[in-house]
Amino acid sequence: MASSILLLNLRGEVLIYRSYRDDVSRTEVSQFCTQVVAAKEASERPIVTLNGVHYIHISQNSITLVAASASNVNTAMIIQFLYKLIDLFKAYFGGDFNEVLIRKNYVLIYELLDEIIDFGLPQITEPEVLKQFITQGGIKKDMKDEQIIGALIQATGATSWRPEGIKYKRNEVYIDVIENVNVLMSSKGTVLRSDATGQIMVKSQLSFMPECKFGMNDKLAMASETQSLDKGISIDDIKFHQCVRLGKFDKDRAITFIPPDGVFELMTYRVTENINLPFKLMPIYQEYGNAKIEISLKVKSMFDRNLFATNVVIKIPTPRNTGKCNIFVVSGKAKYEPEQSAIMWRIRRFPGDSEYSMRGSVNLVATSSEKAWSKPPISIDFQVPMFTASGLRIRFLRVIEKSNYKPIKWIRYITKAGSYQHRI
Amino acid sequence: MAGSHGPQFFVDNKKGEINELKVSLKNIMSERDNTKRRDVIKKVIAYMTLGIDVSKLFTDMVLISHTDDIVQKKMIYLYLVNYVESNQEQALMAINTFCKDCKRISSQNPKIRGLALRNLCSLRFPGAIEYILSAIQDGLSDPDPYVRKTAIIGLIKLHKYSKNLIVGSSFVNTLYELIRDIDPNVSINAILALNEILEEEGGIAINRRMVIYLLNRINSYTEFGQSTVFDLVAKYEPQAEDEMLDILNILEEKLKHSSGSVVLGCIKVFLNYTRDNQLMIRQVFARIQAPLVTLFTGAEVTGAYEQAYCILAHIHLIISKGAGGIFEGDFKSFFCKFDEPTYIKFMKIDILTMIVSDQTVEDVINELSAYVTDVNAEISKKSIQAISKVAVRIPFACVAIVRQLLSFLSLNIDYVITETLVAMKDLVRKYRELTYEILAEIENSLEIASDEGKAAIIWMIGEFGEEITDAPYIIENIISNLIANENYQITHAVLSATVRLFLKRAPEMRDILSSLYSKLISECDNPDIMDRAGFYYQLLRQDPSIANEVLNCEKHPIQNFLEDDCFDLQDILTNEFNQLSVIYQKPAKQIIKPKAELTVPEPEQVTQVVNDLLSLDQVNLSENAFKIDTEFVMVSDDFQQMWMTVPDCIKYENRLSRYINIQEVENLMASVGINCIASGDQMGTLKFFFYAKDSGSDVLFLAEFVIVLAAKEASLCVKCHDKTAAENFKRVFLQASSSFLQS
């Protein structure tokens, strides 16, 4: 698999270099550092081949993680592995990941790299097990266990994700349904594509070995229970945490599982049909020659009037040579921000079923460059609590345990803007 | 640690420091407090990382290595491995330490046993191999899985170090047994090890029982383990359709796994098992569509664009294998978002052109047109190319698409105009009926377009000059502005177009042609262009009607495109699905450089090598004497007669390194003067009869060569009176067949 693993900074300097096999030499690897990372070409392609050596790399917080290999490797696996490394480092560093922390904790990183990979083959990636082998604590020594578990959700073994004998005074389950709604509207206001990707996060604080059954308004699952009037929603695709019994799901769409202790991602799903768009944008750009643009934008919230959106930020792009802007809004604050090349309109609280508008005129400065304005889309960022764009609802969560306790259940919904764009 | 002592490293009494350390190492030998011991060892390590030579402390470090504290062990091992290769005596001491720590009697803690074993296995000198082998032997049967899995990796390390040590030994059987180990990590490592050790035999041998066993416990493996298993299962060939369906049914739930490599691994099994069944493969395509789309959209949402890229590459491949229709309904998922990296956009644009259909063409073209105004010139160009590809694919939409393309000309961006012109030039080659539509619009663009675009316009004027009223005047204008040596591409285009137009509209073009020639003669110094000008001149002087036939011949409309017909390549990729090959869309051979093997010969082998060198000299000498007579011809009667009388002299067997056909073998042999008198193919068994003659000694060689394609076996039987000469013949024969026989 990987012949060596490297961590590089923006300038292509090696922060961490761990070689596992000698079929790729350090001189070869340094070519990648100078020719690709230092030359700022790393973002052009995630997989680069130089002189027969393949470099698979990802970047985060201006750190590039590279796996070098000379063989026909499983690319998806390596990319996934690199992301897992970042998660693991973050867990050990207390949630952060940057050059300073890497330099500070290089001993820990080498120690981790020793146990995670042997001779280029992935070995122990379960943080629980890993802790037995790692002597360096990282800076945050009193890191909570669940933090590490959260870092690496995937567990292994029969029910290796749950140790025996867990006990809580209060048995509680928290369920968060988090949806990202992605919308692309054409300049004429038609919906080009819309989908919602959701994530159901569960925090379980349950004693012993509870058997859980989870139900939502999935169209296919509801079809078998005819008494319900609600038709349910059609979910395109679901992916589950390892603890869910997939065989049972395939048979009768029932979601049953023994939950891990603490926070975990129960499932992710994707819905493309009948998306409830939380916002509608109606922009008008009127250009007056090369000197002036008049913009008017109406934003309408399409969700129930009892709900409200928070932290709504609308980014209305303007040309680079924007000079002076006169902006008029009824609610929220809007101002031109040159570093964004856009008018940023912020509304802290946006009630449902209401409409806000903005008018503005933009004076353009004459420039010598003739390059046409790229017209990036208007984008909007928001959070709508207790609303799901897909219409997904949790119907029940039954917990069955021998000791027969009644857990307290907390359910929250939130819809966030994924990439919510309106072309102009 | 090091920091607080920082300044003292550079003072003269470095020696004193080391002596001091030596003393404190001695002092802590009987110390029970682990933190005190750790501090001293840490100091040694700190010196070592600073580059100070602390090798003098080696003996002391070995002596204090008797501890149960894993922190101290790690540091001591780091020290030992660092200095082990500098000194043979010390090396033995270190090996002893590691070996002792590997033993269960001396170290109770399995973590320490594992650590010691891992460090021991990474030592690389000939003397160590014996010790390593016995330590691995113990490790493989250790009660703790951590030690077992480390021992397995140790075997791979040894194998890489010395090729023939493990292959064929009892270790291979032990590894097969370890696949059934209770610990999932050990089981996976055993599979990985067998794959690497038996690489030359095509990896681990898999049978039905193993497949069933692995699939039954698939959930116990990590996601990396699961993809390893799927790779293996994909290699297995189910005996019956029922069995295949059983396996696929078990695997189906894995398509819901959240890990990309697991899902792709699973798809690999599906594709491999159904590759010969057209009906089933369609069902498989339908089944894998939703998981794939979820995977890449999911990766995009979390910002893992690299993973999205990898999955898109797989989708791209599956589509080019004929699954385009499957993604048709999802075409909107492939629309680009503004903030995506360029490589994702490129991939999506490519995919869009492949899945476009009669129903979706309008939406797709509108979408692609939106990318033309992208700030990134590369994206803009790519989308114009894509639009023209769509026009080629969907003939009924071509008029609408051409109008769309023409609208780009008014954007007044030079690279957009150039790319559009080139695209239109390609389009009119397929749709000649569109010419009129296009020609009316493009003249105005001549000013703005860059060279490539200009050349495209000039080509079109030459090709369709009869339909443009003022074509001669456009050309005339171009010629008068032409600087012959400035740009050869344009000069070339102008020359061809002028001559072709002259043949169509001689009266108007006469003067223009002569003015071009006089310009070229006086200015141009490019021999290529001058040659072509001369050629046209000769052609016209001979007979203008022939020139017209040559230059303005009727062109056949293009029906097929080369890109659509590379299915061979796609089939190779089934076997290499979920690997790097998919990203490059090339088989492994083309992207993986042949490995330079690093093997260290054992002492005994060294003498053998010397012998070989000597014998090589002899061979070289006789080689000069031995030469096959390439002129020699034999009739079949003589051959038959000799075949009956001459005794067998050499028999030789080998395995094929690749598949080969009759013609290729015959050609290879003929190239060295070995002639074939008869050959045939019986149910996959190729049989050849060859003959040859040594030009020096006139010795005759007859040979029978049999290849069993299914088993990849080849056998050679040489008949000859002279044994040494026959050896020479065999050598020539093997040389010629080296491309398909294993070395």
Image: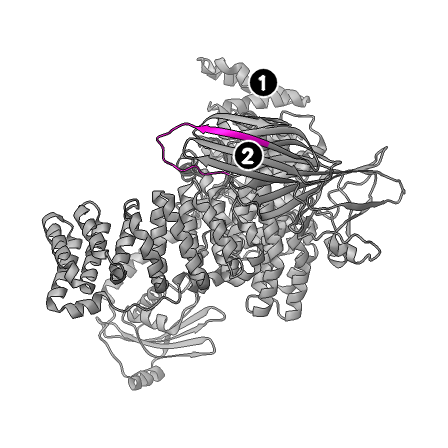
A311 over B594 or under it: above or below: above
Chain bearing mark 2:
A
Q: Is the magenta stretch mostly helix, strand or loop?
A: loop
The residue wearing badge 2 is: A296
User: Which numbered circle lies on residue B16?
Assistant: none
Tell me where residue B428 sits by quadrant: bottom left
Q: How far across and down, in percent of the image, does residue B289 sit?
A: 60, 57
**Tag 2 and tag 1, C-beta contact below 8 Å:** no
Amino acid type of the residue that numbered disc 2 sits on in the rendered structure: Ser
Counting from the top left corner in percent of width and height, residue B726 is at 32, 71
Q: Residues within 10 Å of mark 2 (few under 14, many from 20)?
A: some
B389 is within the stretch colored magenta: no
Amino acid on which disc 1 is placed: Ser
Segment tinted magenta in the rendering: A358-376
Cα–Cα gap, marks 2 and 1: 79 Å
Taking the spot 45% from the left edge, 52% from the top edge, the residue there is: B584
> Can I make out residue B269 in this image?
yes
Q: What element carries label 1?
A: helix
Can residue A69 be seen here? The reply is no
| Residue B478 located left or right of residue A6 | left
Seen in the picture, residue A241 relative to B676 is either above or below; the reply is above
Label 1 marks a residue whose chain is B
